[in-house]
Image (cartoon, rainbow, N blue to C red):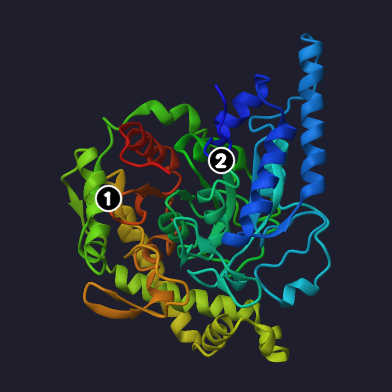
C-alpha cells in the first residue's frame, strides 16, 4: 500500500520507514518539496532547514541500513519517530538559527547555539526538523497576522486566519506540510489555532513539559505543547517530550506518565460533564452544536458550572499584560517603533497596570484554582467549546457573536483563557459539521491527567466524531 505522506500521521510514517517501505530521505524530501511549493500560499514557515534535514535523514537511513544488513548488530536505536519530519514555532531555539519569536527586534540576535529541550528530545527520538514557523509577535495574539513576517492563512480557506499565536504551527499540520509541530500556549495559543485549522492541539499541565530554550511571554502562564493529525500522534509525541529538566525552574520533577499505552483504556469508568453557564453562551450556534455532538457520542448528560470564569479571564488579561510588558520594557523604552503596532500598544497598556491590580489578580487566581480543584473531585473530564466561532477573515477587526459586535483579537480566547489561567491540561479536538469550517471542542482534566483526556479523544476518534 502506498503511503500518502500528505495525509499520513507520524506513527504511520515512522512505521513505514522502519519496515523499509520508504526511506527517510524520500519522506523528508517530499516534505521539503511540499513546503517549497505550498508555503507561499499559507505562509507557515519563516525558515526551512533543508541542508540539516537532508543530512539527518541520510544518517537515519544509514542506521536502518546497517541494522537490516547485520540483524544481530547492537546499533544505535533510531528512535520512536525515526524519519518523521517536524517543525516548531519560531520561539523555540534551533541551533544555528536566530530565534525570532515573531519579532523584528529579535532578528538582530545571534543564532542559537543549542536546541531547546523539546526540540532536542524530538530529535533524539529520530524526528527530523525541517524548519521554524510563523507566529504573532512575542506570542501576544490569537491571529498570526504579523506585520514583520506576514499573515499565516488558513488551509481550509486562505482568505481566513489560522488563529494564533501558534498559527504557523497549526496551519503547517492542517496543510499537510508536516505531521507534527510544536507551539506554545499562554491564553489559548495552541487551542485557538487548532480549532480554527481543524486539527488536534494539546496544551499539557503547566510545568509538565520543559520550556528551556523557549522565548517566554508570560512566565506564570506559558506552556509548550503540540499539534498533530491523530490522537496517537499526540500521545506518542507527548510521551517523548515528558521528563524533568533542571534548566526550566517550573518543569515538574514528577515521573513521566506514558499515555500511549493507555489510549485503549476506554471511558467506562470516567465521570464526564459539559461546562454550562459562561461556556454555553457567547458563541455562534454551531459552536455549541459541536460540543453537543461530542457529548452525545460519549453519552454525557451531566453538566457542571465553573465559578467566575469571566473574572478568571479578566485576571488572566491583567497578569499576562503585566508580565509581558515587564519582559519587553527595555525595548519598549528604547525602540517602540520596531514592534508590531498591535503588540506594542498592548504591551504599553500592560506597563501601566497598577501593581495592586496584579497582586489582586494573583490572589483571585489562587481562589479560582481551589474552586476548580473541588469540581474535579466529582468529575474527571469537562467538555467546552474552544473558540466562539469559525475562523474570521484576514484583517477582520470586529465580528458579530450571538448578536453582539466584539473585537476579533481578544475574543477568540473567550473559552480558553479561564482554563490556562490555572494551568489545566486541555486537548482541542477537531469537529467537522456539514456546511461549516472546522471547530474545536476542549477536553479538560485535572492537572497531570493528560492520559484521561487522550482516552476520551481516542474513543471519539474511533467513532469518527473527531478527525483532522
- Relative to 435, say whether 389 is above or below: below
Q: Quadrant of the C terminus?
A: top left
Name the residue nearer the viewer: 322 or 31. 31
> Which quadrant holds residue 366?
bottom left
Instruction: Give the structural element (helix, strand or loop) at label 2.
Output: loop
Numbered badge on residue 400:
none
User: Could you tell me which residue is drawn at 60 percent across and 25 percent down?
Assistant: 15
Asked if residue 242 lies left or right of residue 308, the reply is: right
The image position of residue 96, as x and y in percent, is 83, 56
Asked if residue 292 lies left or right of residue 110, the reply is: left
Asked if residue 241 lies left or right of residue 381, the reply is: right
Instruction: Give the structural element (helix, strand or loop) at label 1.
Output: loop
The image position of residue 310, as x and y in percent, is 30, 72
Numbered badge on residue 6:
2
Q: Residue beneath label 1, please? A: 434
- Relative to 63, say whether 118 is above or below: below
Which of the marked residues, 1 or 2, is nearer the chain's N terminus?
2
Q: Quadrant of the N terminus?
A: top right
Q: CA distance from mark 1 to mark 2?
A: 23 Å
> Which quadrant holds residue 76?
top right
Name the residue nearer the viewer: 214 or 39. 39
The image position of residue 185, as x and y in percent, is 51, 60
Decide: few, some or many residues near mark 2? Use Cα within 10 Å; few <14, some 14-19, many ≥20.
Answer: some
Tell me if I can see residue 163 in this picture: yes
The total of numbered circles placed on residues is: 2
User: Could you tell me which residue is drawn at 66 percent across and 84 percent down?
Assistant: 329
User: Could you tell me which residue is drawn at 19 percent across and 38 percent down?
Assistant: 299
- Relative to 322, say whether 206 is above or below: above
Amino acid at each position: 500500500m502506498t503511503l500518502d505522506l500528505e495525509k499520513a500521521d507520524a506513527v504511520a510514517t515512522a512505521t513505514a520507514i522502519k519496515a523499509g517501505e520508504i526511506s527517510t530521505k524520500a519522506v523528508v524530501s517530499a516534505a521539503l518539496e511540499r513546503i517549497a511549493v505550498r508555503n507561499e500560499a499559507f505562509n507557515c514557515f519563516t525558515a526551512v532547514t533543508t541542508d540539516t534535514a537532508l543530512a539527518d535523514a541520510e544518517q537515519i537511513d544509514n542506521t536502518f541500513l546497517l541494522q537490516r544488513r547485520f540483524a544481530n548488530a547492537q546499533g544505535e536505536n533510531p528512535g520512536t519517530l525515526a524519519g518523521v519530519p517536524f517543525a516548531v514555532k519560531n520561539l523555540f531555539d534551533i541551533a544555528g538559527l536566530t530565534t525570532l519569536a515573531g519579532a523584528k527586534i529579535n532578528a538582530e540576535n545571534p543564532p542559537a547555539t543549542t536546541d531547546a529541550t523539546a526540540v532536542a528530545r524530538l530529535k533524539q527520538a529520530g524526528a527530523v526538523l525541517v524548519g521554524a514557523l510563523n507566529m504573532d509577535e512575542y506570542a501576544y495574539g490569537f491571529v498570526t497576522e504579523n506585520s514583520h513576517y506576514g499573515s499565516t492563512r488558513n488551509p481550509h480557506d486562505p482568505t481566513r486566519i489560522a488563529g494564533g499565536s501558534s498559527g504557523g504551527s497549526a496551519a503547517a499540520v492542517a496543510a499537510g506540510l508536516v505531521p507534527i509541530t510544536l507551539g506554545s500556549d499562554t491564553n489559548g495559543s495552541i487551542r485557538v489555532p487548532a480549532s480554527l485549522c481543524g486539527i488536534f492541539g494539546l496544551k499539557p499541565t503547566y510545568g509538565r513539559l520543559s520550556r528551556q530554550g523557549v522565548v517566554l511571554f508570560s512566565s506564570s502562564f506559558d506552556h509548550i505543547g503540540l499539534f498533530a493529525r491523530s490522537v496517537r500522534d499526540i500521545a506518542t509525541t507527548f510521551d517523548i517530550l515528558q521528563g524533568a529538566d533542571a534548566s526550566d525552574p517550573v518543569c515538574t520533577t514528577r515521573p513521566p506518565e506514558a499515555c500511549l499505552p493507555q489510549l485503549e483504556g476506554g471511558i467506562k469508568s470516567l465521570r464526564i460533564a459539559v461546562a454550562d453557564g459562561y461556556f454555553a453562551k457567547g458563541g455562534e450556534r454551531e459552536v455549541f452544536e459541536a460540543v453537543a455532538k461530542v457529548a452525545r457520542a460519549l453519552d454525557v448528560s451531566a453538566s457542571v458550572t465553573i465559578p467566575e470564569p469571566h473574572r478568571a479571564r479578566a485576571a488572566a488579561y491583567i497578569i499576562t499584560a503585566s508580565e509581558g510588558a515587564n519582559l519587553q520594557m527595555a525595548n519598549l523604552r528604547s525602540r517602540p517603533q520596531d514592534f508590531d503596532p498591535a503588540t506594542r500598544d498592548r504591551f504599553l497598556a500592560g506597563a501601566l497596570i497598577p501593581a495592586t491590580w496584579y497582586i489582586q489578580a494573583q490572589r483571585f487566581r489562587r481562589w479560582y484554582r481551589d474552586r476548580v480543584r473541588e469540581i474535579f473531585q466529582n468529575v474527571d473530564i469537562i467538555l467546552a467549546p474552544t473558540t466562539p466561532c469559525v475562523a474570521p477573515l484576514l484583517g477582520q477587526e470586529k465580528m458579530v457573536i450571538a448578536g453582539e459586535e466584539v473585537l476579533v483579537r481578544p475574543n477568540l480566547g473567550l473559552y480558553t483563557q479561564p482554563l490556562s489561567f490555572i494551568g489545566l491540561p486541555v486537548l482541542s479536538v477537531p469537529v467537522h459539521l456539514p456546511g461549516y469550517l472546522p471547530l474545536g471542542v476542549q477536553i479538560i482534566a485535572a492537572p497531570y491527567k493528560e492520559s484521561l483526556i487522550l482516552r476520551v479523544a481516542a474513543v471519539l476518534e474511533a467513532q469518527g466524531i473527531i478527525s483532522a
